[in-house]
Structures are given as C-alpha cells and as structure tokens.
Image (tube, helix red, strand yellow):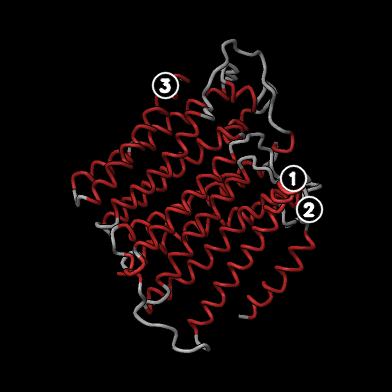
Amino acid sequence: MVELGQIALILSFMMAGYSTIVGFAGGMLNGRDLAASARWGFYSISPLLLLATAALIYAFVTNDFSVKYVAENSNLAMPKAYAWVAFYSGNAGSLLYISLAFSIMAGIAIRVVNSKLPYTSPYALGVMSMVLLFFLAVILFLANPLDQHQVPLEDGQGMNPLLIHFGMFIHPPFQMLGLISVALPFSIAIGALLAGRGGRDEWVDQGRLWGMVSWLLLTTGLLLGAWWAYTILGWGGYWAWDPVENSALMPWLAMTAFVHSIMVQKRRGMFRMWNMVLIIVSFAMAQMGMFINRGGPVPSVHSFAESTMGWIFLAVMAATLFISLSIFVFRYDTLKSRSGLDSIISRESAFLAQNVLFLLIAFVTLWGTIFPIFSEAVDDTTMTIGQPFFNKVNGPLMLLLILL
C-alpha cells in the first residue's frame, strides 16, 4: 500500500507539472485543446493524492512503523480515532493534507471559472497548478510522509500530548484550508492580468466568490483556534497575539479588505489597481503564515513543528511577490478605473479608508510577529514583542475601524 502511495505522489507531481506548462501554453496560444488537456490533467491529481493519503492513513491504522512519519507521530497506545489527526500533525503529513485539499478546491474552482471566464481560465489554471507543483515538490524531495525505515520499529514515538485534544480534529484542518485557499482568488486575479483582461471586471464575480470562500475558512479557523487556546492552560486565553495566531489573522485582515473593496469595483468600476494589490498582499500574507507554521524561527506556544523548511516558504513568498508585482506593473495600463472618488466624504472613500486600516493592522501585526528574526540577526539575541505592543498599537486602529 505504501509503495502504491509513493507512485501516486510521483504521478501527481508529474501531472501538476504538465498542467502548469500546458495551461500557460493554452492561454498564450489560445489553444482550446491544450487548455482542456491541462484541465483534465489537473483533475487527475486529486484522485492520486487521495490514494497517497489513504496509504498513509492505512499505515497509521495498521501501526506500520516501517513508515518514518508513522513512527514519529504515533505509537501502539494511540487510539485509532486519532489516525486522522496524526495524518496532519507533522510537517510532511500536513503538506500532503494541504495538497489534497487544494487539489480538490482548485479542481472545483477551475471547472466554474472555465465556464465563466474562458480566456482567463487557462492562465488561472497554470497559476493554481504551479502552486500545487511547489507543494508536491517539497513533499517528494524534502518531506515525504511515505518514506520508510530500512528496519521496521516495534513502536513509535507518539504524538505530542498537547495534540491529543478534540481541537486537533477541527482547528488545524480549517486553518490550513484557509491559508491555502487564498491561492484561489489570487490565481484568478493573476490569470486575468496575464490574459490582459484585468480591467474588464469580468473576473470580479469569480474573484469575490472564491475570496469569500477563503475568508470564511480563515474566519472559521480563527474562531476554532481561539476556542482551543481558551481550553488549554498556558496558551493565553482566547487571543494572545501569538505568532501562530497572527499567521492566520494577517491574511484574514487583507482578505477582509479585498472582499469589501471588490464590491466597489463591481458596482462602480473603481479600485481596479487597488484590488489587484490587495489580493497579491493577501496571498503573500498567507505564504508568510505558512512560513511561520512550517517551523520558522519565530517562537510560539502553538507551534510543534521541528522542521527548517520554513525558509523555503519564505523564499517562494519573496519570489511570488516579485513576479506578481512585475505582472501588475506590466499590465498597469489595462487596470485604469472608469471613475475616481466623487468626494472625500463618500461611501467609496469610507471603503478605501477601511481598507487602509485593515492593511495597517496587518502590517503592524506582521512587524511584531517577525521582529525576533531581526533582533537575532542584529545582535544574536531573540527578542519577542508581547501583548502590550499589539494592544497599544492595534487597539486604536481597531477602534477607528469600528467607528468607520
């Protein structure tokens, strides 16, 4: 079963690469057959990843400690019901979970987008495939959950005792879904830019639809995380401005600004450039969240990751941000709005002011979260910023946001 899962992972990686290349080629050459081939290639990925996931869960259920990941995250005493939790409790398994979930969500999104936006769809598919290709590359070459020991162990290490909690069944899946789902509206927006149709507003409905899906998943993850933190002694109650908590809050703030601002674009043809910037920033924030959750150098009471692969996510975030902004600059002339602000005192002005406040809170939170990285780089001492800083700076901004 494990060998079958390994083959499925390799095939899914190959199909993601195929869909990336052929998807972009279909868009650039206006080739319907190429675009259709890329779509069907992408649709094949989720069944393959489902097979790989089934192989891993089967290994947990049968206590197959020849699988390294199973030996590291379970033992004979672990209840069978926690096989699902153990599946994504470590770095390698969580990456497989993210890949499976994204392949399913993106498959649905591609099917819908293709029927609504035929010119944008191939490019959006190419971007989604590239996102999935990255995760599958990390899984295959750096963190394969199906790698095996040469000599099987008699028992495993078991999960961290703090993870033996009902919250593990619901919070991590939603948080991971929320972070990766930001790639859906991002792909649609970048796809529209690449197709030269960013200024036509035809992508707005799909952008907002999948933006709302992402926002709802992020919101659910935040609420479940607050509830779980309240039930665990030493986690600071509902909200403690912990880096892992902040990792989901930052993209949530940016996505909140996006789903509100894009309504103005739909109604008035305004904020076209601004909305593109918002979704690019939102995806960058989501990638930063993954960096923090992948064992980045930011200390957190909620983080149990022991991997150093977080730096890869940071490098990919920087590359994605650079490429996205380059595409934005290249297509700048296609994004001119039909009209400007009528007055400083208007509904649209209020929307823009709210957007700015959402982003200010997000960037203040980002700075406070990653400050330990800079302090360690400067004087080799890890200094953290606690609740007083966040409450003092973000408190007035949030109050002003409520008043608006």
Residue at 67%, 34% in the rendered image: 306
Residue type marked 2: Gly
Residue 288: x, y in percent? Answer: 58, 50
User: Within 10 angstroms of label 1, few (less than 14), some, or many (20 or more) residues?
Assistant: few
Q: Which mark is residue 301?
A: 1
Q: Which residue is mark 3?
A: 4
Task: Classify residue 273 as left or right of residue 289.
Answer: left
At 66% from the left and 63% from the top, the residue drawn is: 364
- Tags 1 and 2 touching, CB below 8 Å: yes
Q: CA distance from mark 1 to mark 2?
A: 9 Å
Q: Do the residues bearing badges 2 and 3 touch, measured as CB atoms within 8 Å?
A: no
Q: Residue furthest front?
A: 378
Q: How far apart are the two marked residues, 3 and 1, measured between alpha carbons?
A: 37 Å
Q: What residue did someone put label 2 on?
A: 236
Q: Quadrant of residue 89?
A: top right
Which amino acid type is marked by label 3? Leu
Instruction: Provide the secondary structure element on which disc 3 rests.
Output: helix
Amino acid type shown at disc 1? Val
Where does the image place residue 263, in percent across and percent down from the top left? 43, 73
Mark 3 or mark 1: whose residue is earlier in sequence? 3
The secondary element bearing badge 1 is classed as loop
Residue 93, compared with residue 125, is above or below; it is above
| Residue 280 located left or right of residue 22 | right
Residue 26: where, in percent of width, then height?
23, 47
